[in-house]
Amino acid sequence: MPVPERPAPAGSLSDSSPRARLAGLDGLRALAVAAVVIYHVDPGWLPGGYLGVDVFFGISGFLITHLLVTEHREHGRIALAGFWRRRAVRLLPELPLVLVACAVTARLTARGGSGLGDGLRGDTLASLAFVNNWWQVHRGADYFHHLGVPPLLQHLWSLSVEEQFYLLWPLVLAVLLPLACGRHRARVTTCLAGLAACGAVASLWRMRTLGGRPSGVSRAYFGTDSHSGALLAGCAAALLVPALTRLARHRPGLGPPLAHIALAVLAAFAATGPGDRVMYGWGFAAVTAATTALCAGSAAWTSPRLLEAAPLRLVGRHSYGLYLWHWPVIVTTTALWPAQGVLERTVELLAPLPLAVLGQLVVQRPLATALGRRDGRRASPASVPAQPVRLLSARNAVLVVLPVAAAALGAVALSPSTVPNAMQRQLQAAARNEAGLTAGAGRPHAPSAPSSAGAAAGSGLSPHSAAGVVDGSDVTVIGDSVTLGSAPDLHRILPGISLNAEVGRMMQSAPDLCRQLLAEHRLRGTIVLALGTNANFAPEDLDHVRATIGARRLVLTTVRGPFPWQDSVNSVVRAYHRHHPDVLLDDWYTVSGSHQDLLWTDHIHPRGGAGTTLFATSLVATLTASPP
């Protein structure tokens, strides 16, 4: 995440705040980036670690606003050109370095079919234009669930949100702050804070409205309009710092307890990771409020001692580089070594820090020094607003623009173009086939690659078991992308089956879907739930399904994949089968264990032909072993 230029830590937060300290915000940044890295390595370790991004947003809004307000108070204006120049020097040098590294990695692994480079060119262009978040919305991406290998640059969505903020918010302040002069200063500043607070509430409400629908969760998460609540709340807090400082003089004991409560709230959300209903209902608002309280408390009172620890402050100063590098490292390691042992996890946790330090030493710091910046020696520089804005000399412009532009162009040229891989094409073809069937276009076509016998030979099954011998006219299958990719063979081997599969579907949506199918008289006598690839679930979710379907027969499947919740899902499914003997178990995990060569390189989805036939015949074996 971007590290905003920090104001001088003493004597500049207000006209009379000599003891104001912002050192703790570096520590808060360190905890935030650590939470994000841990979450991406294994969501089970810190289920709410992704909220570190929202903490970053709050810090950025607070610090940038305070920097601009201080500059205006001391010089009577905001030098927009100087602000944007400093932002460019801080952010641009390291970004192309990461883009080039990702492009080279994608090229080197292309022949192995890892899928690391799928769509990378479009992602690169969107990242350079700082519209990555809207590009993710356009592509229908999902931050929390991925089909195959996650995009190498998906994490840059948050950088795009912040850059859009850096472009627009300084313009608002440059226009409105001149009104805050003389005796009207406090009143106008309070009105500006109210404006920012109203914007934060509107953004959080927008997120709540969009996130309340399953189809709108990704739009709510990636959208600038719906995910700017923390940024704008931080802006409001920065504008109120003078008033808070006066309050701190009269109530010095008020700030520390509130700061500790706010820190505890953030820790609780990070540790528990509440579900969508809580987070989009009020959770993001609570995280925003806690982050804003910590920022304001650090300015007007003091930060909790934990946040001022020297190691945390050091890591916090490298948070931008850590954020840039951690996701490509994790995605690459997981794609190439999906077993994810101790060594791989250790690399994913530790490798981003030396890469971040190296990027700053080799790229960012030399370019900052070339521009004559007094603060080029620091990773999180202290800005001195009193400095006049210096125009770049021709030599300095060449020193900065030429290597950055060359690296950016190189990243675009090296990045593979947006061509779906074979697994994605398989799923797209299956989706079109299902759409045609739903629209009444006729039966889906059988897969053209292997015949029944050929597929059976490839999977190690007998031709008899692979033949379409089971009537599927009384079977409803509810599944996710694994089921969708196997749809042609499911229709071939279970003719007449009713299949309802969707990429990214989770077990939590199954009860409502069953109720809908029941109301439409489309729920058959045997219901197969092939879910669990995208998220964990509890036995209560299965109880809700059973309560909905009544006396109908229920079949559960186990899952396989390098995702952290694999074992948890399989334990829930097997325990439920043991406690409810009438519930059948299709043990896909065990069946696929000796045929992992029939899975795609994500080690989740069966390959078309032998792999999808194996998935279908596993279900057939379960149904025929326990006829209704």
Image (cartoon, rainbow, N blue to C red):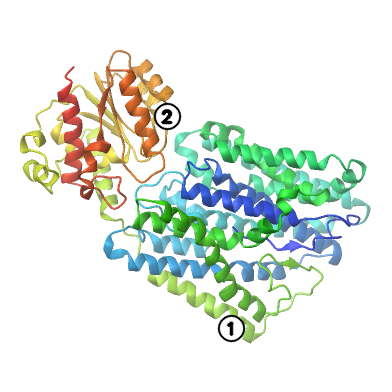
- Horizontal and vertical percent position of residue 112: 27, 62
- 181 relative position to 270: left or right: right
The quarter of the image holding the N terminus is bottom right
Q: Amino acid at mark 1?
A: Val
Q: Kindly identify the residue that appears in the image at 44 percent across and 60 percent down.
A: 123
- Horizontal and vertical percent position of residue 610: 16, 45
Numbered mark located on residue 508 in the image: 2
Q: Kindly identify the residue that appears in the image at 6 percent across and 38 percent down.
A: 463
- 40 relative position to 184: left or right: left
Q: Residue furthest front?
A: 342
The quarter of the image holding the C terminus is top left
- Indicate the quadrant where residue 293 lies: top right
Quick check: can you spot residue 205? no
Q: Amino acid at mark 2?
A: Gln
Q: Which residue is mark 1?
A: 398
Numbered mark located on residue 171 in the image: none
- Horizontal and vertical percent position of residue 232: 68, 48
SS of the residue under disc 2: helix
Mark closer to the observer (2, 1)? 2
Disc 2 to disc 1, how far (Cα)?
55 Å
- Indicate the quadrant where residue 199 lies: top right
